[in-house]
């Protein structure tokens, strides 16, 4: 079945909406004169198939966002885009590096650079290897296209859920200076400016720069430190981007781009959503209040004694060449060559408390993720009366480096010792197990002096991965009749990944090593505490398991592993588009999408040394996981009314994912599981209406997406809630709407108003679907009003983001080491300010 009953109801609603809007549009807005057609919505062009086409002629579900709408709604990065796109969710977790985009409930889950993206981010034709790598101030945007469903035929691997295609403003031959100054609450100050000019008759230059600062959204209690920064979630961002365009003749253009950006901020602390029984232990070790005394996350008050300093640098160069060749009737040869270098350092307080338990220092030796990427794309595109064709070649060479570490503070041993003994005591009647001086239990079990079993730099691991990818692709549309177009696309991808990993325990893993060397002593420590003899044999390996958590497991020390995987995969699409009349085009499509397999860049251990094993302490050498595939089917309609001023589009979709890659945090480590099946089905509707009221524009859409895991059982007890359940980050309903109105007053002034909103029904933010990670339905509203000159020389705008201060979680997670406690990373609160724009 393509869609169940709720989906058919949604389709009926969409059709009714279309008919009603159409009638209203015909009543209010006469068809424009022929010479005004370029100003209508029907003239909107996109590059969804890497050629310029009218959006209403492309058989793909697309949300196209023009420059003015992006400016009106305050879009600066890909996270902001979600306000305007139903079915798009973008979230961040322990740093802005871990930014994940999802479309129709499908996306990469987890904080691990080894997993590639399900939603591709492409900026000016250059693919960014992870969503976080594409996160940042996008600068002067010409438009953003959000393509939904598999797009691998044209855009390549790792676009199995869709693509966010960003096109920035290119140089032109007008001399123009533009500037922007913003002041807002939380101490926000931002300045941006651009300069564009001609360099003779055949060249032009454009440069853009921006600097933005803001205080943090969250107050931080630092306890005894050493963290000194008492706010988190601040902003300190700057970027510079230059472009040089050469057009030596009317058949050749060359655009060179160089960009650099830097973020030096503090991000991100977790907020307590459920305060568990271990809080009392943490308070005692912290010498006061170590965690939130009451779970009140939206008070935005966190406890963290270690810094969350993040330092992100991104730079790159690219060259795009378009040459109208003398071959094949004037086919266009396009070459896009790019080299990029992205790196991030991020400190982290893993226990999210002021007790000094476990943390990562913000330096390149202990916390580093970096990508160096070279890519080359060649395309030859041509057209005849009957055939639009394209053939291409893509090559990329990517080096990924990760330095991962865990440091253990002075509170780690007494905390773990107390928690473990308390958990054991709870299994027996009160008073059976002696819990006096519980903090010394693990020192007794290890036979080492108290405080010497765990401490210092517990784990320091190095990962170096190289990935080379080559692809051949073609996408061709045959105009079978004046009304019928048939499209066939095919892509062959060959990829090789090589990973070298070096693991070490600089502190020697003394506590774990002692437990492994002498399990009898562990049993004696249990007996000394009064544990019944009949239970001791079963408890000894459990206690050693706690002594040998991944960051303290001496079995990892000195391990060196090398892994390699080769993939050769086909992906492709078949589409049929039929234009019923001048107003309605219908289409049907089938596509096979592909997302690359890879390696889990984390310490992995299990009961049997296999990734599929249950919890245990045996190191896993093979951390690979297979590629992810999707079979997608769509049935859609694109309709144009009111002389091209009203667009009403709808798409029914059914997507079946196999070997869906799920990275889940199980409280002590991340594990990657291949979920046998995930099915996403529903309807996606969109409206764009340039109304009969001059200056009034409406944009919006509604998506119903029923995205569920398959019913096959999974090996992890922590993932037992998944089979048959709705996927995480997959609201059943989502909707967006934006209204813009511009009017004139006086001889030289205009006013402009915009309000935009995004609604999401309830969904779960955790990969394991714990109910504590649920997020109820919510709506975020942005608004902006401005007054300026009719000639656009200046405009002053007052704005508010999250106008009604909606409270919602981005991601919920288990509080590490704190059974019964949950934390969350929150969405941004209401912010407001004033922006002055000038243009000369």
Image (tube, helix red, strand yellow):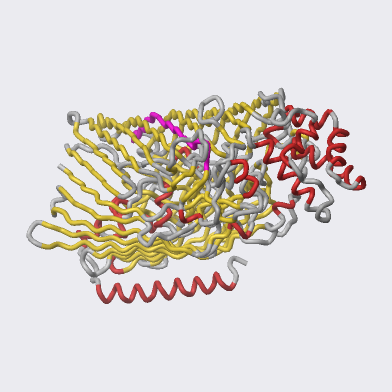
Q: Position of residue 398 (x, y in %)?
A: 53, 29
Q: Position of residue 725 (x, y in %)?
A: 65, 61
How many numbered discs, if any?
0
Q: Position of residue 49 (x, y in %)?
A: 43, 47
In this picture, residue 64 sits left or right of residue 98? left
Q: Main secondary structure of the magenta part?
A: strand
Q: Is residue 238 above or below residue 837?
A: above
- Let me know if residue 257 is in the magenta part: no
Q: Quadrant of residue 352?
A: top right
Q: The N terminus appears in which quarter of the rendering? A: bottom right
- Let me know if residue 316 is in the magenta part: yes
Q: Answer whether residue 213 is visible to the viewer in this image.
A: yes
The residue sitting at the left extreme is 747
The residue sitting at the right extreme is 534
Q: Quadrant of residue 690?
A: bottom left
Q: Answer whether residue 704 is visible to the viewer in this image.
A: no
Magenta-highlighted residues: 304-324
Q: Position of residue 482 (x, y in %)?
A: 40, 60
């Amino acid at each position: 079945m393509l869609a169940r009953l709720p989906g058919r109801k949604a389709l009926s609603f969409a059709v009714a909406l279309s008919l009603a809007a159409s009638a209203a549009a015909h009543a209010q807005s006469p068809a424009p004169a022929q010479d005004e057609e370029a100003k209508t919505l029907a003239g909107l062009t996109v590059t969804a198939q890497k050629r310029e086409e009218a959006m209403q002629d492309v058989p793909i579900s697309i949300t196209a966002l023009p420059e003015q709408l992006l400016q009106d709604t305050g879009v600066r990065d890909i996270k902001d885009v979600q306000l305007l796109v139903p079915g798009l969710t973008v979230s961040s977790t322990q740093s802005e590096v871990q930014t994940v985009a999802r479309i129709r409930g499908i996306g990469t889950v987890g904080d691990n650079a080894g997993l590639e993206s399900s939603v591709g981010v492409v900026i000016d034709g250059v693919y960014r290897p992870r969503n976080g790598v594409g996160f940042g101030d996008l600068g002067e945007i010409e438009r953003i296209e959000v393509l939904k469903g598999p797009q691998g035929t044209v855009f390549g691997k790792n676009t199995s859920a869709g693509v966010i295609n960003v096109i920035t403003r290119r140089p032109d031959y007008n001399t123009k200076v533009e500037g922007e100054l913003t002041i807002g609450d939380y101490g926000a100050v931002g300045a941006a400016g651009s300069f564009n000019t001609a360099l003779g008759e055949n060249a032009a230059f454009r440069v853009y720069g921006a600097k933005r600062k803001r205080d943090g959204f969250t107050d931080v209690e630092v306890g005894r430190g050493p963290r000194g920064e008492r706010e988190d979630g601040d902003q300190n961002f700057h970027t510079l981007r230059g472009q040089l365009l050469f057009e030596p003749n009317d058949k050749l253009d060359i655009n060179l781009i160089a960009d650099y950006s830097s973020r030096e901020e503090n991000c991100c602390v977790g907020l307590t959503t459920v305060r568990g029984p271990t809080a009392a232990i943490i308070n005692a070790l912290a010498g006061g209040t170590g965690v939130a005394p009451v779970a009140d996350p939206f008070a935005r008050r966190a406890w963290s004694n270690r810094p969350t300093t993040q330092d992100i640098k991104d730079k790159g160069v690219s060259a795009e060449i378009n040459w109208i060749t003398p071959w094949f009737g004037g086919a266009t040869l396009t070459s896009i060559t790019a080299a990029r270098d992205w790196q991030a350092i991020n400190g982290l307080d893993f226990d999210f408390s002021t007790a000094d338990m476990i943390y990562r220092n913000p330096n390149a030796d202990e916390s580093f993720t970096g990508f160096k990427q070279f890519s080359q794309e060649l395309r030859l595109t041509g057209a005849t009366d009957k055939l639009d064709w394209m053939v291409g070649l893509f090559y990329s060479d990517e080096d990924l480096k990760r330095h991962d570490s865990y440091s253990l503070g002075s509170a780690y041993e007494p905390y773990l010792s107390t928690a473990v003994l308390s958990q054991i005591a709870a299994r027996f009647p009160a008073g059976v197990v002696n819990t006096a001086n519980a903090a010394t239990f693990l020192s007794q079990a290890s036979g080492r002096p108290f405080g010497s079993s765990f401490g210092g730099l517990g784990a320091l691991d190095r990962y170096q991965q190289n990935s080379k990818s080559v692809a051949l692709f073609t996408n061709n549309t045959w105009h079978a009749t004046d009304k019928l177009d048939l499209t066939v696309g095919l892509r062959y991808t060959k990829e090789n990944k090589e990973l070298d990993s070096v693991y070490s325990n600089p502190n020697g893993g003394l506590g774990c090593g002692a437990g492994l060397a002498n399990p009898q002593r562990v049993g004696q420590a249990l007996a000394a505490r009064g544990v019944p003899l009949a239970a001791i044999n079963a408890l000894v390996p459990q206690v050693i398991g706690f002594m040998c958590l991944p960051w303290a497991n001496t079995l990892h020390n000195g391990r060196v592993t090398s892994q390699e995987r080769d993939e050769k995969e086909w992906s492709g699409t078949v589409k049929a588009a039929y234009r019923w009349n001048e107003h309605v085009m219908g289409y049907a499509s089938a596509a096979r999408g592909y997302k690359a397999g890879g390696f889990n860049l984390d310490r992995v251990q299990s009961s049997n040394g296999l990734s599929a094993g249950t919890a245990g302490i045996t190191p896993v050498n093979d951390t690979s996981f297979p590629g992810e595939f999707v079979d997608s089917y769509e049935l859609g309609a694109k309709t144009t009314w009111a002389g091209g001023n009203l667009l009403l589009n709808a798409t029914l979709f059914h997507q079946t994912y196999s070997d869906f890659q799920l990275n889940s945090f199980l409280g002590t480590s991340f594990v990657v599981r291949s979920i046998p099946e995930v099915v996403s089905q529903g309807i996606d509707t969109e409206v764009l209406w340039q109304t009969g009221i001059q200056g009034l524009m409406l944009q919006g859409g509604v998506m119903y997406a029923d995205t569920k895991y398959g019913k096959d059982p999974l090996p992890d007890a922590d993932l037992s809630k998944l089979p048959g359940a709705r996927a995480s980050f997959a609201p059943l309903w989502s909707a967006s709407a934006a209204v813009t109105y511009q009017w004139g007053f006086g001889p030289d002034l205009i006013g402009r108003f915009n309000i935009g909103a995004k609604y999401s029904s309830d969904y779960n933010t955790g990969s394991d679907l714990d109910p504590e990670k649920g997020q109820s339905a919510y709506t975020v509203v942005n608004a902006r009003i401005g007054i300026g000159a009719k000639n656009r020389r200046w405009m002053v705008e007052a704005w508010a983001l999250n106008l009604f201060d909606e409270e919602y979680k981005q991601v919920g997670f288990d509080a590490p080491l704190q059974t019964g406690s949950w934390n969350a990373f929150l969405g941004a609160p209401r912010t407001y300010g004033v922006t002055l724009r000038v243009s000369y």
